[in-house]
Amino acid sequence: MADEPEVPPVESQETTGRYLVVFAEDASADVAAAAAGISVAHTAEYAADASIDVESVLQEADAVYFDELKVAVTKAPPQQVQFLGARGEAGSPVIAVAEERIVYPSEELELRRVQIEEPEARPAAEGSRDYARGYRDAISDLYFRLYGAPDAAREEGGIIAPAAGPLWVDTATLTWGLAATRVNASTFTGRGVRVAVLDTGFTPNHPDFAGRPVASANFVVGEPPQDLNGHGTHCIGTALGPRRPRATQRRYGIAGEADIFSGKVLAVGGSGDSVIIAGIDWAVRNRCRVISMSLGAEVRPGQAHSAPFEIVAQRAMNRGALIVAAAGNDSSRPGIVIPVSHPANCPSIMAVAAIDAFGQVASFSNRAINPAGGQVDIAGPGVNVFSSWRLPLRYRTISGTSMATPHVAGIAAQYLQRNPGLTPQQLWAELQMRARRLPLPNIDVGAGLVQSV
Amino acid sequence: MSNSSKVRVVISVADEQMNDLSSVTAALNDAGADVEQAYESVGTIIASVDESKVDAVRNVNGVTHVEQERIIPGPPPDSDIV
């Protein structure tokens, strides 16, 4: 019984009393319907350009089955619909059952709410005031349904509202960032996907990466190959760390089975574009699908993005690689807000902003101030992010759009494992499509908080 | 002798010439640039050139964009915001 879809009772006035039934891809709707004693009219039997009047078809048949969609609308009573979902040898043919709702055009909906408050005609003067009060109450009701009481911490219900406490916290077994991006609910590991992280290098003898193959390259002249800073190890940890780390209980990494390509491009004293481009070339030649760059140079208001770097990014995309880069940490909100850094400000590079565990924009996170490029595309967890660090420290909790960026990169690897055929442009669209919309300006967070799949 | 100030530039090569970077490289050298790297994957050349010769580099056949490279700072070592 546990696996059969529940049939909800018809309660509200806003439903038709009928049910929508979604069938599995390989299910035979006819077999299930016959077993339940439900007669079915198939849309496939109508001419392609015929308009089907569902109401009148349902005078004669118990259900209309939309063959192309594998969805039926049925007037059959709940017990019969329940039977439809009964398990056969091949499992239940039904994925979901829902009440058929009545849908209004938006303007009409608001009028209806007001009418609910004011059903009777009244003398003009009194009527106007009561009308206004009714309207106010309807809007207040709508407001509180959406945003809740002012001091309630609201996470459930899908809307993130200003709250008294954080929406997410580090637990003993999971970082807040992985909870906020729903990585913990995903089974995708990035297996088969090559991800390049261009940064300060990696710490190859870190216990959490023992036995994990890592391709490394050093483009910094005069420095040894390993990570002298820790920053690169931290970013690789977030994007690509193991599901079950060895030296801590707390999971901090996303695509634990992706192929790691660590390119050291950031010298202690900084690096020119030429070194970054060397790293990009290496990643592209090695068929990396995601290139994570937690690096950037401050940009002035009105300054254009780099045309040659934009061309590098476009051509990397043509070669199957999505470049994801940090929007930059130059701001000090609310007083000082700086444009998105170079090279994240290139249109063909996905620029990542940072949010904190309260669902707010990080104080340091840059904003889309410059036109023609320079936008923020998406946001990730970037404040107090726990991840791997160089030895002997092993772990560190730090902040930055540098931390938000590898969240996107690791999740992108999960998307690519799920759907290997995605082009970089399609991957970009999917990441934005599934991002969790935030009640924050898109010049600060782009499409919203990246979500795992 | 005048003081030459050399700058490193990032040079974009036209789509049609991406497969033949060597001829663009030769032309750049003729124009007075020291070509350091040529990346076929992204059709981009890195060169050092005297500031006075940047315009000549721009006019080389097959070159679409030339910009002085920007410097990306390393992560600040003593900060918790990186």
Image: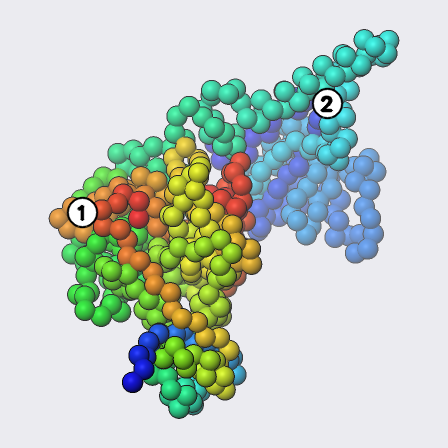
Task: Kindly identify which residue carries mark 1.
Answer: A394
Measure the alpha-carbon separation of dots 1 and 2.
58 Å
* Residue sitting farthest toward the left: A392
A177 relative to A203 in the view: left or right = right
Q: Residue A132: in sight, yes or no? A: yes
* Residue sitting farthest toward the front: B1
Expressed as whole percent of the image width and height from the top left, the position of residue B18 reads 46, 82
* Chain letter of the residue beneath label 2 in the structure image: A
Task: Kindly identify which residue carries mark 2.
Answer: A113
A97 relative to B14 in the view: left or right = right
Residue drawn 77% across and 16% down?
A131
At label 2, the amino acid type is Arg
Describe the element under mark 2 as helix, strand or loop.
helix
Compare marks 1 and 2 and give the one earlier in the sequence: 2
Describe the element under mark 1 as helix, strand or loop.
loop
The foreground one among A318 and A442 is A442
Q: Which of the labelled discs sits on residue A409, or is there none?
A: none
The foreground one among A225 and B82 is B82
Expressed as whole percent of the image width and height from the top left, the position of residue A52 reads 81, 46
